Amino acid sequence: MNKWKGGGFGMYSEIHYYYNQIYIPDMSVDSLIKDDSMKESLGFLMLMPNDINLKKSAELILKTTKRDSINIQIWRPLMNSESGVYTRVLENETYLKHQDL
């Protein structure tokens, strides 16, 4: 059995994607999401943290902030029910230079 084939119990088997964290070194994500297009892009990135969405968000941030490079990381919370330990796990990350656009 997995979370999709558990007789309906799989829908509560993971922490909701809303609690994923976008981390960009030396930059405040809260200040970025004030822009509507950035809020939509980063919100979709939290929902689907795949390589394509990471690259799209990185390109948008580079164009908006005029930085030379950017590193975006998506961290997913993880709860070990046996030990009761709450940690974070690196889900995905990308590094993009302005010259790569």
Image: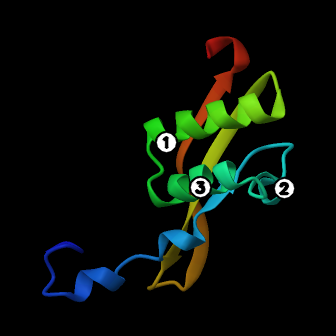
Residue 50 in the image, given as x and y percentages of width and height = 44, 44
Q: Cα distance, mark 3 to mark 1? A: 11 Å
Residue 45 locus on image (x, y percent): 53, 52
Point 60% across, 77% down: residue = 86
Location of mark 2 (residue): 31
Q: Which residue lies at the image location 71% right of the left edge and 51% below the top edge?
A: 23
- The 10 Å Cα crowd at callout 2, few under 14, some 14 to 19, many 20 or more, is few
**Residue at 44 percent of width and 85 percent of height:** 82
Residue type, label 2: Ser
Q: Quadrant of the N terminus?
A: bottom left
Residue assigned mark 1: 53
- Circle number at residue 40: 3
The one of 13 and 46 positioned closer to us in this rendering: 46
Considering only vertical position in the picture, is 26 above or below 80?
A: above
Q: Secondary structure at mark 2?
A: helix
Q: Amino acid at mark 1?
A: Asn
Horizontal side, residue 52 vs residue 1: left or right: right
How far is the residue under mark 1 from the one under mark 2? 20 Å
